[in-house]
């Protein structure tokens, strides 16, 4: 890597120290946040960037957050004339964001009175306004999904700017909770500013440059381990919630030496429903897959992704035009992008690639009340991981582009008019084979008062694929018990619930790897 041994040790220690700062940012955010989604489920991510907006370190938080920030932050930092104690906020998916509930707080890091880098904390807020509680309904335009925050000052040289706060009070549900969570994000960034001020500026910047140089070699080495060739794969999103079915996502990987081209040409056009992806989300999904091929100790900078080029025609499902709705693109389409990229890589290196995981985040959003008693609750559900050459898939875990915890029954029932009536592993839902896919889970809620429900789910008709002859995992199922009768709910949509109604979600199992010995 062109680094002498003593410098390599120093650089490794430096990389781990930066990662520790990001982890500490996350601890501050978790302990300071108000909403259970951030405080308990830990639906947030923290990272550090160079003064040019290039990722230099991150914690092990949410892949879709971190990869998209690595892709898009440089566009944001160039907009402003930064001063100490500035704080910038944004959520616009087409200007550095992912989907509207994910709000990013950015603070410049001044060391010895010189701009040296940036700290960023991105968190999923339980509501950002819009037509449906939780801002995750089946809408047909971005503006209907909620408040759009283009990059703007929240604090300018330490002075709060009132416009953002006014917009939040005017547009979102439970605004005090939103502002409390934003303040927790700001506190996380302030912690990073304190920690980096412990460094000498010249040393810090020289180590940034060395770390970026070294980390690129990890990316190149990972790609060079894949045999040269062209590998193609296709999978489908089942629907967009607005009547369009079977939206194709096609990928062609072209591996030449230490570089790879990831081409989505031929994928479906952008959709009327909210399954579209801004390019940052697509990049995050691609980056995640290739990061999984690298050693765990690889320095987590943007440079490890320099050997990866992405082609996605403007206006297609995975590179939608500005204004297209994206609520499910970040949580559902990102998962399918992972499925197709892994499927293509399985043609090249099947012994290193797992069968398909559940392929969905199983988004469930409840909301109700009025005025000061208005409430919104959001969670995603675990499912089965795909089996692989070394063994069975894990059961009832968060998969791929999400990395949140489950919501504890105690916290949920303490804060919301909801009761958990069932929570269990969904036995025998993983695919059968030499190595079996992980099982999904079953979670059932009873609502105590009338409220609103939104669902954004996938793999309800299709199944997570097995590899090398292994069987597919079972698809998921959404059900409603009302007036003494069970009925099936669609994968995506909204419904009004009455007190006493029950919602049951059965999540998909993972695909199996290889035909079982009994069938060989």
Image (spheres, grey):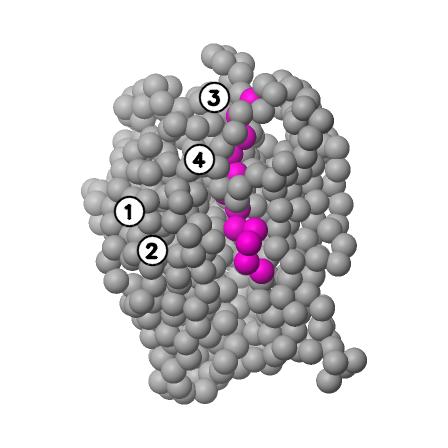
Q: Is residue 493 left or right of residue 507?
A: left
Counting residues from the start of the chain, the first of labels 2 and 1 encountered is 1
Locate residue 25, reporting x and y percent.
51, 44
The residue identified by callout 4 is 137
Q: Nearer the viewer, residue 109 or 409?
A: 409
Left/right of residue 275 with respect to residue 367 in the rendered view:
left
Q: Which residue is mark 3?
A: 174
- Magenta residues span 451-463
Residue identifier under label 1: 94
Residue depicted at x 45% and y 60%: 236
Determine whether the residue tagged by mark 2 lies in a helix, strand or loop: loop
Counting residues from the start of the chain, the first of labels 1 and 4 encountered is: 1
Q: Residue at x 28, y 23 (%)?
A: 163
Q: Between disc 3 and disc 2, whose residue precedes?
A: 3
Residue 61, visible in the rendered structure: no
To which residue does mark 2 refer?
A: 317
Q: Secondary structure at mark 4?
A: loop
Image position, residue 193 (x, y; %): 42, 44
Earlier residue among tags 2 and 4: 4
Q: Tell whether label 3 touches label 4 (CB within 8 Å).
A: no
113 sits left or right of 389 in the view: left
């Amino acid at each position: 890597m062109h680094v002498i041994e003593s410098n390599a040790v120093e650089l490794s220690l430096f990389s781990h120290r930066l990662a520790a700062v990001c982890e500490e940012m996350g601890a501050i955010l978790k302990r300071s946040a108000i909403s259970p989604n951030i405080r308990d489920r830990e639906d947030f991510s923290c990272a550090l960037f160079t003064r040019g907006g290039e990722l230099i370190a991150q914690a092990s938080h949410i892949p879709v957050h971190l990869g998209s920030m690595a892709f898009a932050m440089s566009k944001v930092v160039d907009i402003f004339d930064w001063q100490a104690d500035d704080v910038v906020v944004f959520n616009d998916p087409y200007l550095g964001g992912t989907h509207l509930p994910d709000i990013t707080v950015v603070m410049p890091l001044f060391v010895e009175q010189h701009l040296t880098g940036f700290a960023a904390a991105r968190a999923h807020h339980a509501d950002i306004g819009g037509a449906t509680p939780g801002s995750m309904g089946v809408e047909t335009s971005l503006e209907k999904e909620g408040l759009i925050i283009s990059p703007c000052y929240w604090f300018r040289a330490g002075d709060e700017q009132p416009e953002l706060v006014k917009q939040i009070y005017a547009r979102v549900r439970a605004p005090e909770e939103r502002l409390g969570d934003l303040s927790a994000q700001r506190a996380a960034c302030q912690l990073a500013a304190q920690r980096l001020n412990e460094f000498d500026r010249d040393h810090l910047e020289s180590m940034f440059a060395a770390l970026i140089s070294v980390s690129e070699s990890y990316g190149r080495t990972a790609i060079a381990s894949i045999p040269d060739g062209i590998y193609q794969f296709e999978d489908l999103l089942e629907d967009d919630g607005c009547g369009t079915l079977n939206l194709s996502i096609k990928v062609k990987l072209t591996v030449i030496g230490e570089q790879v081209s990831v081409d989505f040409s031929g994928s479906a056009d952008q959709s009327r429903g909210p399954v579209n992806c801004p390019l940052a989300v697509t990049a995050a999904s691609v980056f995640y897959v290739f990061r999984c091929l690298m050693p765990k100790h690889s320095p987590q900078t943007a440079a490890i992704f320099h050997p990866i080029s992405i082609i996605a025609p403007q206006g297609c499902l995975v590179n939608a035009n500005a204004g297209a709705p994206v609520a499910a693109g970040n949580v559902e389409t990102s998962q399918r992008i992972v499925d197709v990229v892994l499927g293509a890589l399985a043609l090249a290196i099947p012994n290193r690639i797992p069968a398909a995981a559940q392929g969905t985040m199983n988004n469930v959003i409840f909301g109700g009340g009025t005025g000061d008693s208005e409430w919104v609750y959001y969670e995603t559900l675990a499912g089965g991981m795909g089996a692989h050459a070394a063994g069975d898939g894990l059961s009832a875990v968060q998969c791929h582009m999400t990395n949140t915890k489950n919501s504890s029954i105690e916290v949920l029932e303490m804060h919301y008019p909801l009761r958990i009536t069932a929570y269990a592993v969904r036995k025998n839902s993983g695919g059968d084979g030499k190595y079996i896919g992980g099982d999904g889970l079953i979670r059932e809620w009873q609502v105590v008062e009338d409220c609103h429900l939104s669902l954004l789910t996938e793999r309800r008709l299709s199944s997570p694929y097995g590899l090398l002859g292994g069987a597919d995992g079972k698809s998921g199922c959404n059900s409603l018990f009302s007036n003494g009768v069970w009925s099936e709910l669609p994968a995506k949509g909204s419904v009004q619930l009455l007190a006493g109604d029950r919602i049951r979600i059965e999540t998909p199992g993972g695909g199996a790897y290889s035909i079982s010995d009994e069938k060989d």
